[in-house]
C-alpha cells in the first residue's frame, strides 16, 4: 500500500509569509494527526481529525495555524503569517479507525522561517 | 496531562553491546505504549507496542520492551546491537480510552560504531 505522503518536503519562507503543508493519508485511514518537532525537542501533538471532523485540536499553538480536511481525505495545515518559532519538522500520521491500530507516519515537511 | 520522559538523549555503543533506553510516562489511567524508530532519511515507523497482557513485548529486529506499571516505565532493550540500529528512537503513550492523542518523548539518538 502507498504510505502517508507529505508535500513539500522542505519549505523556506520569510517571516510574515504564508505556507500550506499537505498530507495525503493512507487510503481508508479515518484518523489523521499533525505533529511538529522543533529541533531537539519532543514530537508535539497539534491536532487529530476523524474523517473531516476535528477530534482534538488542543495542541494547535495559536490562531495563525489552520488545519482542514475537507471530504475526509487529504489534509492541509496553513500557517499565516509565519513566525520564526514556527520552524521545525511537521509530521502527518494516519491510522485506521480501530483503536488498536498503529500510527503510520509521513516523511515530514521541514519548515524554515527566516 | 500526559507526558513522556526519555532520559538518554544521545547513546553511543559499539556493535554487539547491549542496549537499554529508558522511557517513563505520566498518566493515571490505563495506557497503550509504543516505541517508534526513525532511521536516517526515513519516516518514523513502529518498533513495538503494548496494549495489554504480557508486559514483555517483542518487536521487530530483535527489540523488546518491558512494561512495569508500578514504575510507569516502558524501557526498550536489545541484547546485541548492530550498526544498522543507528537511528533515533521515540517512546509514545496514549490513553487506552478517550481521544487517542499520542504523546511522544524527546527521542534518543543512538549511534552504533562498527
Image (cartoon, coloured by chain):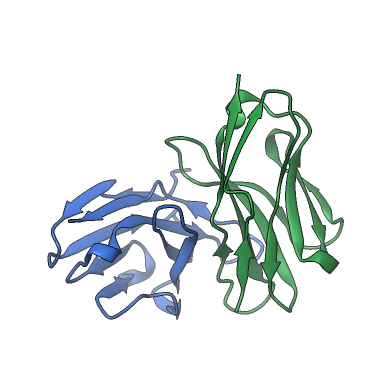
Q: Is any part of residue B107 visible from this angle? A: yes
Q: Residue furthest top?
A: B114
The residue located at (28%, 74%) in the rendering is A66
Q: Colour of chain A?
A: blue
* Drawn side of residue B29 relative to residue B35, left or right: right
Q: Residue B80's spot in the image, x, y percent?
A: 75, 28
* Drawn side of residue B96 relative to residue B108, left or right: right
Q: Residue A112's spot in the image, x, y percent?
A: 24, 53
Q: Residue B91's spot in the image, x, y percent?
A: 62, 55
Q: Residue A97's spot in the image, x, y percent?
A: 57, 66
The residue located at (61%, 59%) in the rendering is B92
Quadrant for residue B29, please give it: bottom right
* Drawn side of residue A10 relative to residue B66, left or right: left
Q: Is any part of residue A32 visible from this angle? A: no
Residue A35 drawn above or below residue A4: below
Q: Nearer the viewer, residue B23 or A65?
A: B23
Residue A67 drawn above or below residue A15: below
Q: How many numbered discs sit on the rendered protein?
A: 0
Q: Quadrant of the C terminus of chain B?
A: top right
Q: Colour of chain B?
A: green
Q: Nearer the viewer, residue B2 or B54?
A: B2
Q: Nearer the viewer, residue B56 or B77?
A: B77
Residue A7 drawn above or below residue A32: above
The residue located at (46%, 35%) in the rendering is B40
* Drawn side of residue A111 relative to residue B111, left or right: left
The residue located at (69%, 56%) in the rendering is B23
Q: Quadrant of the N terminus of chain B?
A: bottom right
Amino acid at each position: 500500500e502507498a504510505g502517508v505522503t507529505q508535500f513539500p518536503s522542505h519549505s523556506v519562507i520569510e517571516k510574515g509569509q504564508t505556507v500550506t503543508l499537505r498530507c495525503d493519508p493512507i487510503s481508508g485511514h479515518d484518523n489523521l494527526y499533525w505533529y511538529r518537532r522543533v529541533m531537539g525537542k519532543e514530537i508535539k501533538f497539534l491536532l487529530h481529525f476523524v474523517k473531516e471532523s476535528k477530534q482534538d485540536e488542543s495542541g494547535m499553538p495559536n490562531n495563525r495555524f489552520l488545519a482542514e480536511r475537507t471530504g475526509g481525505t487529504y489534509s492541509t495545515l496553513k500557517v499565516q503569517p509565519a513566525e520564526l518559532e514556527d520552524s521545525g519538522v511537521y509530521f502527518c500520521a494516519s491510522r485506521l479507525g480501530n483503536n488498536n491500530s498503529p500510527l503510520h507516519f509521513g516523511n515530514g515537511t521541514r519548515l524554515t522561517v527566516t | 496531562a500526559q507526558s513522556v520522559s526519555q532520559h538518554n538523549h544521545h547513546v553511543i555503543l559499539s556493535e554487539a553491546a547491549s542496549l537499554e533506553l529508558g522511557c517513563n510516562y505520566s498518566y493515571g489511567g490505563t495506557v497503550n505504549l509504543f516505541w517508534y524508530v526513525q532511521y536516517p532519511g526515513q519516516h518514523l515507523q513502529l518498533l513495538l507496542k503494548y496494549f495489554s497482557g504480557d508486559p514483555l513485548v517483542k518487536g521487530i529486529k530483535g527489540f523488546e520492551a518491558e512494561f512495569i506499571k508500578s514504575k510507569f516505565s516502558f524501557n526498550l532493550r536489545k541484547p546485541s546491537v548492530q550498526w544498522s540500529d543507528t537511528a533515533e528512537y521515540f517512546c509514545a503513550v496514549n490513553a487506552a480510552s478517550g481521544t487517542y492523542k499520542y504523546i511522544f518523548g524527546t527521542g534518543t539518538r543512538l549511534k552504533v560504531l562498527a
